[in-house]
Image: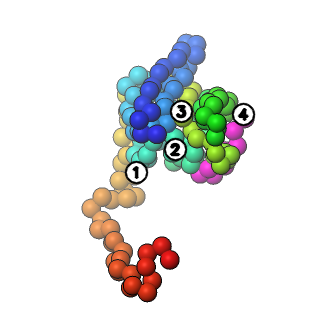
Amino acid sequence: MKDIKSIRLTERGAAQVALYADAGIALSEIVLLAAERSLTGMEFCAGIPGSIGGAVKMNAGAYGTEIKDTIETVDLMNGSGEIRECKRDMLKFSYRNLDLPESAIITGASFLLNRGIKKQIQDRITEIMGMRKAKHPSNTTMRVPYLKTPREEFPPGK
């Protein structure tokens, strides 16, 4: 999925824009693009790692907003390789999950965003990043578990 990297914007009247991104696009790239274009709705994703596909599948969210709140459509590929567009009301989102058939693969998603004021959008992103940094300071030491080499009577995978 990392090689799927197309983005397009489609006008939806004077106040809204649909931002379509392929599944391999980094979520951070969409947050920055939306802010640059003065589009509001994706600020809550600031600092969330991962791709569009992963964020949609996990219904990524923070600070009272989830991906499902901005989704217009999701493109799904079935086991036969056919891709179909599913509208928001056809999808079953729950807390940190999008319920999909086991063989379904997310190939892209369209987010319905509103026109906003660039400075306010950038300020909100800065605020969210500050809250994230306060909650998860990067100067803390992460402990890595000590892994032992398995004994011969217990080979890996057995």
Residue 46 picture location, percent across and down: 42, 42
Q: Pointer 2 and pointer 4: residues touching (CB < 8 Å)?
A: no
For the residue marked with disc 1, what is the amino acid? Met
Name the outermost residue toward the top: 14
Of pointers 2 and 3, the one earlier in the residue sequence: 2
Q: Pointer 1 and pointer 2: residues touching (CB < 8 Å)?
A: no
Which residue is the site of mark 3?
108
Of pointers 1 and 4, the one earlier in the residue sequence: 4
Of pointers 2 and 4, the one earlier in the residue sequence: 2
Of pointers 1 and 2, the one earlier in the residue sequence: 2
> Which mark is on residue 131?
1
- Label 4 to label 3: alpha-carbon separation: 17 Å
Which residue is the site of mark 4?
89
Q: Is residue 58 magenta?
A: no
Residue interval drawn in magenta? 89-97
Q: Pointer 4 and pointer 3: residues touching (CB < 8 Å)?
A: no
- Label 2 to label 4: alpha-carbon separation: 18 Å
Residue 78 picture location, percent across and down: 64, 38
Residue 35 picture location, percent across and down: 40, 29
For the residue marked with disc 3, what is the amino acid? Gly
Q: Is residue 127 left or right of residue 100?
A: left
Q: Assess disc 2: are there few (<14), some (14-19) or many (≥20) residues with their C-alpha within 10 Å of its C-alpha.
A: many
Report helix, strand or loop for mark 2: helix
Of pointers 4 and 3, the one earlier in the residue sequence: 4
For the residue marked with disc 4, what is the amino acid? Asp
Look at the picture and state if 41 lies above or below 129: above
Residue 20 picture location, percent across and down: 51, 26
Which residue is the site of mark 2?
55
- Label 1 to label 4: alpha-carbon separation: 32 Å
